[in-house]
Amino acid sequence: MPGATALEQATIMIEEAWGRPIEALESLAVHRTTDDPLLRSAMHIRSTLLVTANSTVAVHQERLHALTRPGHAPAFYDLQRITRSAADLRVAQAESRTALQAISHVIRASEAAATADGAPSSPPGAGRCCPLRA
């Protein structure tokens, strides 16, 4: 997953944890909210990545690349814009990493809840740590 975006990483983590495609999980999280509140939380956090990872990070990266393109000598007044764009990019990337970490915590909580409910613990990498209750 090193080359994947934060949104792609979140999608993979959620799909592996609940053992279903993201489209099915989105539908369950919206229509059957009381069945699995931890799934709803993970999907809500993932939705923030749609904004943060896809648009905010991309906008700041494009702005920074435009200001520092090869063969272009930035003017004095561009230096403040470059610094601000770099700082904004770092903030957006930190927000994305924080959202990924939050999803990871929700998944661990779901695994702990499933184990506490008496469900057998799935082996690492089994992909079914968070069964949905029908």
Image: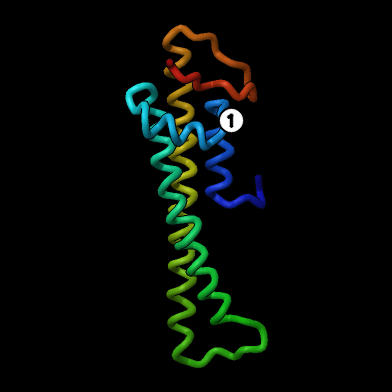
Count how many numbered circles sit on residues in the image.
1
Q: Quadrant of the N terminus?
A: top right
User: Picture coordinates of residue 82 (x, y %)?
Assistant: 49, 79
Q: Residues within 10 Å of mark 1 (few under 14, many from 20)?
A: some
User: Picture coordinates of residue 22 (x, y %)?
Assistant: 53, 36
**Mark 1: which secondary structure?**
helix
Q: Is residue 20 above or below residue 80?
A: above
From the viewer's side, name the closer residue of 20 and 37: 20
Q: Is residue 107 above or below residue 96?
A: above
**Who's the residue at 43% across and 55% down the image?**
51
In the rendered structure, the answer to whether residue 9 lies left or right of residue 111 reads right
In the rendered structure, the answer to whether residue 101 lies left or right of residue 5 reads left
Q: Is residue 110 above or below residue 6?
A: above
Q: Is residue 49 above or below residue 77?
A: above
**Who's the residue at 48% across and 29% down the image?**
107
User: Picture coordinates of residue 19 (x, y %)?
Assistant: 57, 26
From the viewer's side, name the closer residue of 58 and 102: 58
The residue at which mark 1 appears reads as: 16
From the viewer's side, name the closer residue of 27 and 117: 27
In the rendered structure, the answer to whether residue 3 lies left or right of residue 116 reads right
**Who's the residue at 43% across and 67% down the image?**
88
**Who's the residue at 52% across and 64% down the image?**
58
Q: Residue furthest left?
A: 34
Q: Amino acid at mark 1?
A: Glu
From the viewer's side, name the closer residue of 32 and 113: 32
User: Picture coordinates of residue 5 (x, y %)?
Assistant: 58, 52
Q: Residue furthest top?
A: 118
Res. 32 image quadrant:
top left
Q: Quadrant of the C terminus?
A: top left
- The colour scheme of the drawn protein is rainbow
